[in-house]
Image (spheres, grey):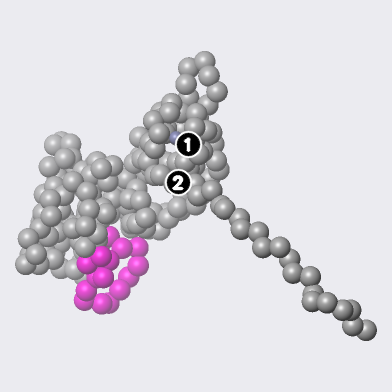
């Protein structure tokens, strides 16, 4: 049986999705402490929204930044001086700004936004390769959670490129174009140690300097 006329056409509805802006901020809580126990929503709540500046917890008023759930985050490499290179999985906290609707993701001190490796591990790689003169293979063996028989290490090339573009450790000065990888790594290593606490064993200073540089 056939009905006359064209089949009904569903009206086209254009949904205008309100795009929420997402920002990432660093907590004062170190990655090692955070990995042992995820801080409560209260403890990790930022003082203010980094997009609009509204107070996260204004005195005597409703919250400006409300808890918006947890998200799993991987941090590769050692997360503290002398630590073993492992793949760490931890929860990061997210908040929603009631004033500008931004989603604020709080990552630990020592995390590098968008990168899998922690700031300390990247800083350590640059120190071993650029300052200590170690081979890529031995640097990789110390920093990467995975064993490899390859001579090179693509991750190091990617990090140096990202650092040059200001995507990691934005305060490191750009290098002249003709510089090779080892010299670039040396500049990163010097920048890491320049901002680090001047006390303690080298690896402690490397992890401290890496975390400081990662915060921008
Ligand atoms: Zn806001």
Residue drawn at point x = 14 percent, y = 59 percent: 185
Q: Which residue is mark 1?
A: 100
Q: Is residue 187 left or right of residue 85?
A: left
19 lies above or below 143: above
Percent coordinates x, y for residue 121 in the rendering: 27, 54
Residue 136: image quadrant is bottom left
Percent coordinates x, y for residue 74 in the rendering: 43, 55
Residue drawn at point x = 15 percent, y = 68 percent: 135
Percent coordinates x, y for residue 171 in the rendering: 18, 46
> Residue placed farthest to the bottom in the image?
1
Q: Is residue 157 left or right of residue 194?
A: right
11 drawn magenta: no
Q: Which residue is mark 2?
A: 21
Start-end of magenta stretch: 143-158
Residue drawn at point x = 21 percent, y = 76 percent: 151
Percent coordinates x, y for residue 84 in the rendering: 33, 55
> Residue placed farthest to the top in the image?
60
| Disc 1 + disc 2, Cβ < 8 Å | yes
């Amino acid at each position: 049986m056939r009905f006359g006329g064209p089949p009904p056409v569903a009206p086209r509805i254009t949904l205008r999705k309100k795009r929420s802006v997402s920002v990432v901020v660093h907590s004062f809580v170190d990655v090692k402490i955070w990995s042992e126990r995820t801080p409560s929503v209260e403890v990790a709540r930022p003082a203010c929204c980094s997009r609009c500046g509204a107070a996260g917890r204004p005195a005597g008023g409703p919250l400006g930044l409300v808890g918006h759930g947890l998200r799993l985050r991987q941090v590769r490499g050692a997360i503290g001086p002398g630590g073993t290179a492992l793949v760490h999985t931890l929860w990061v906290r997210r908040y929603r700004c009631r004033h500008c609707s931004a989603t604020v993701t709080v990552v630990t001190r020592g995390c590098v936004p968008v990168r899998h490796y922690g700031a300390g591990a990247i800083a350590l790689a640059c120190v071993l390769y650029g300052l200590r003169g170690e081979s890529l293979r031995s640097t990789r063996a110390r920093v990467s959670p995975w064993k490899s028989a390859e001579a090179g290490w693509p991750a190091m090339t990617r990090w140096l490129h990202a650092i040059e573009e200001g995507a990691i450790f934005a305060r490191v000065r750009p290098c002249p174009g003709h510089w090779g990888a080892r010299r670039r790594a040396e500049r990163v290593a010097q920048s890491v140690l320049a901002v680090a606490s001047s006390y303690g064993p080298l690896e402690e200073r490397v992890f401290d300097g890496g975390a400081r540089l990662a915060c921008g």
